[in-house]
Image (cartoon, rainbow, N blue to C red):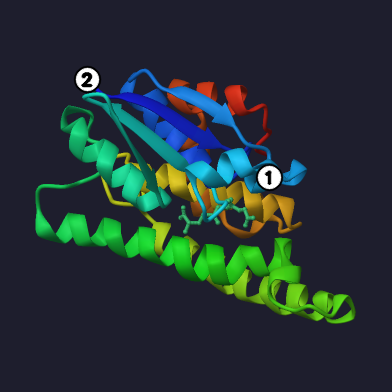
Amino acid sequence: MPQYRLYYSPGACSLAAHIAFEELGVACEPIRVVIAEGQNQTAEYLAINPRGRVPALVIREGGREQVLTELSAILIYLAQTYPAAGLLPLDDTLPFVRMVEWMSWLGSSMHAGGVRTVLRPDRFISDPAAAEAVKTRGTENVRIGFADIESRLHGRTWALGEHYSMVDAYLLVFFRWGNRIGLPMRTDYPHYTRIMDAVRARPAVQRAIAHEGIQIE
Ligand SMILES: N[C@@H](CCC(=O)N[C@@H](CS)C(=O)NCC(=O)O)C(=O)O
């Protein structure tokens, strides 16, 4: 059985990987790397993930350690290593690619090109005077993204249909970020809210949230 260390920052996208471990009940040592305090840029952390990002999963097996980065890769690794838990649909082509479609879009347009422009405009423009304009335009883009999520979740039990999956956990990260950037998530996105309330009600999710010490409105 591999041993795991999961590097996470409270409320970062690493929350979805944290939830995955709680859902699996697989032992994992969660290691806090607080981005707001620059802990992701220390020499110690950069030796683990030179990209300076979380999540990073250290997999220790047979006396050897490997580091896996990128949330979607970590979720697929866990789903495939522990298939009985059904974290993600891996067996049939269409459900599988639907999951890849969600995770690709969340990781790119919604995260790197969306919420990040609002929370970290300094990464997109060096002139602090122009940062506000980046944030404003970024917020508009994020709202377009949330409207798209809302329409896709309409009439669904979970993001992928009848089965809860780690796509729902990933969506919870964005729901919280939406609140953080001041969007009225509960009033503007009722279908998204309904599913996120169901995600939050899961004991595994509550454990991950409590461990990270974060709030989700
Ligand atoms: N594409 C990466 C993105 C990881 C990422 O950007 N994580 C953020 C936290 S949500 C981070 O580590 N930010 C630190 C920084 O940008 O300095 C993934 O999906 O894992």
x and y, in percent, of residue 177 in the image: 64, 52
Q: Is mark 1 within 8 Å of ligand 1?
A: yes
Position of 149 with respect to 98 (left or right) is: right
Query: What kind of residue is marked 1?
Result: Ile
Residue 75 seen in the current view? yes
Ligand 1 sits in quadrant = bottom right
What distance separates the C-alpha of mark 2 from that of mark 1?
30 Å
Q: In the image, what residue type sits under mark 2?
A: Met
Which of 196/86 is in front? 86
Q: Taking 101 as reference, is 60 above or below it?
A: above
Residue 147 shows in this picture = no
Residue 1 is marked as 2
Instruction: Give me the residue at 56% from left, 47% from top.
Output: 46
Identify which residue is drawn at 39% across, 34% down.
Answer: 58
Placement of 188 over or under 173, stated as above or below: below
Task: Name the secondary structure under disc 2.
Answer: loop
User: For the view shown, which residue lies furthest in the right direction?
Assistant: 129
- Quarter location, residue 114: bottom right
Q: Residue at x 16, y 28 (%)?
A: 84
x, y (%) of residue 30? 51, 26
Identify the secondary structure beneath mark 1: helix
What is the number of the mark on residue 168? none
Q: Earlier in the sequence, mark 2 or mark 1?
A: 2
Label drawn at residue 35: 1
Left/right placement of residue 5 relative to residue 214 reads left
Q: Looking at the figure, which quarter contains the C terminus? A: top right
**Residue 119: quarter of image:** bottom right
Front-most of residues 80 and 160: 80
